[in-house]
Image (tube, rainbow, N blue to C red):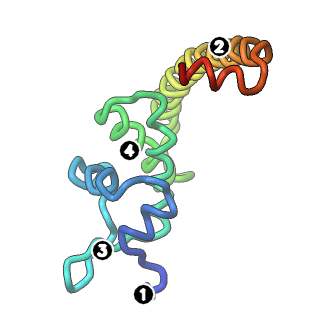
Amino acid sequence: MGSRELMQIGEVAERTGLSLRTIRYYEEVGIVVPSARSQGGFRLYTQADVNRLLVVKRMKPVELTLDQIRELLEILDRLAAAGESLGRTERVTLQTKLREFQATARAREAVLETQLCMIREFADDLSIHLDDVPTGAGRRAVAG
């Protein structure tokens, strides 16, 4: 692997939008471990590591526990690594677990969609009140 293919944690943070602290935490709990270390001990990440962090980032709004995140990553890894060599029984078992995670994600999506609708309604309600306030009058009312 050439040195251009390895990234230090700062570049990974920029690419993923995750904080350095979060990336280090994911390493501590064994969710995403850097592929290498420099001679100076700096964490070095591959594009595959970045992709894994992005998957974990997308899991965050679903509010999965660390154990659930680990389990889901293991399932995805197993499916990717085994490919066609995976036995039918194991493939069905893994796909059943994936369907359960998908159902959890869909349920969370529904909750967030409801919350988003409420936020939109609230913002619309505020707009109605703002449309009734003449320009400048609102500033006086706040200052007074």
Q: Is residue 39 left or right of residue 16?
A: left
The alpha-carbon separation of the residues under discs 4 and 3 comes to 20 Å
Q: Which residue is mark 4?
A: 74
Q: Nearer the viewer, mark 3 or mark 2?
A: 2
Which of these two is toward me, 1 or 131?
A: 131
Say which residue appears at 54% left-offset and 53% top-offset.
Answer: 83
Q: Sequence order check: which comes first, mark 2 or mark 1?
A: 1
Q: Looking at the rendered structure, which numbered label has been put on residue 3?
A: 1
The alpha-carbon separation of the residues under discs 4 and 2 comes to 41 Å
For numbered disc 1, what is the local secondary structure? helix
Say which residue appears at 62% left-offset and 22% top-offset.
Answer: 140
* Numbered marks: total: 4
Q: Which residue is mark 2?
A: 122
The alpha-carbon separation of the residues under discs 3 and 2 comes to 49 Å
Q: Sequence order check: which comes first, mark 1 or mark 4?
A: 1
Q: Which residue is mark 3?
A: 36
For numbered disc 3, what is the local secondary structure? strand
| Quarter of the view holding residue 71 | top left
Tell me whether the residue at label 2 lies in contact with that at label 1, contact meaning CB atoms closer than 8 angstroms.
no
Q: Quadrant of the C terminus?
A: top right
Where residue 97 sits in the image (x, y, percent)? 46, 28
Tell me whether the residue at label 1 lies in contact with that at label 4, contact meaning CB atoms closer than 8 angstroms.
no
Q: Is residue 61 left or right of residue 84?
A: left
